[in-house]
Amino acid sequence: MLHLNARRLLFETSKEKDYIWRWNSLLQDIFRTTVEAKLTYATPAWSGFCSVGDRVRLNAFLRRCTKLGYRDRGALDIDTLFTDCDERIFNKIKYNSSHILQQFLPNRLTVNYNLRTRSHNKTLIPKTSYLNERNFLIRNLYKDCY
């Protein structure tokens, strides 16, 4: 009798753990589709204007959400999320000749000598002000240019 009660208790506990795991998974899915989607919406346009303090506060918020179980423990920090969004949209612009932002990229640079290959073959726009460094297109054109 005691053996059967222990087995039953173990079965109920495993059912509760399964229920908790499914609930946490559902919470993380909801968090990813609502909060993270709102954070990453249009990040190429506004992430360049985030100060270091803003990024620290956003990372603290994401860490708090991870601690509470709303977010997966292996999820990316805010800087990596910003970089991934920037790279994704810049690659779409760079490789799609009919993209609406393609017209704002400078013409292709013709080089007659053999140099190290860049991630793009566009002409670099000169940085003339503080706001130019925050611009999405200029930021990505200068990215990985040593």
Image (cartoon, rainbow, N blue to C red):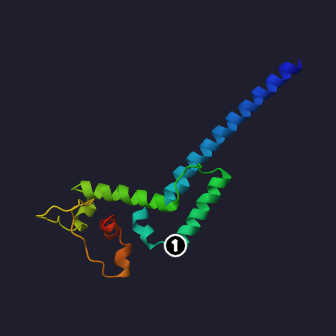
Image quarter hosting the C terminus: bottom left
Q: Residue at x 38, y 80 (%)?
A: 130
How many labels sit on residues?
A: 1
Height in image: 24 above or below 65? above
Q: Residue furthest left?
A: 112
Considering the image in quadrants, where does the N terminus appear?
Answer: top right
The picture places residue 2, in percent across and down from the top left corner, at: 89, 21
Residue 79 percent location from the top left of the image = 48, 62
For the residue marked with disc 1, what is the amino acid? Answer: Val
Residue at far bottom of view: 129
Question: Callout 1: 10 Å neighbours few (<14), some, many (20+)?
Answer: few
Q: Mark 1 points at which residue?
A: 52
Q: In this view, does 20 lie to the left or right of 133?
A: right
- Residue 28 in the image, given as x and y percentages of width and height: 59, 47
Residue placed most toward the observer, 75 or 27:
75
The single residue placed furthest to the top in the displayed view is 1
Q: Please give left or right for residue 86 compared with residue 57 in the image.
A: left
Relative to 114, does residue 23 appear above or below in the rendering?
above
Identify the residue at image location x=24%, y=71%. Answer: 124
Q: Which image quadrant is residue 106 in?
A: bottom left
Answer above or below: position of 94 versus 135: above
Tell me where residue 58 sits by quadrant: bottom right
Camera-side residue of 120 and 102: 120
Q: Which secondary structure lies at badge 1? A: helix
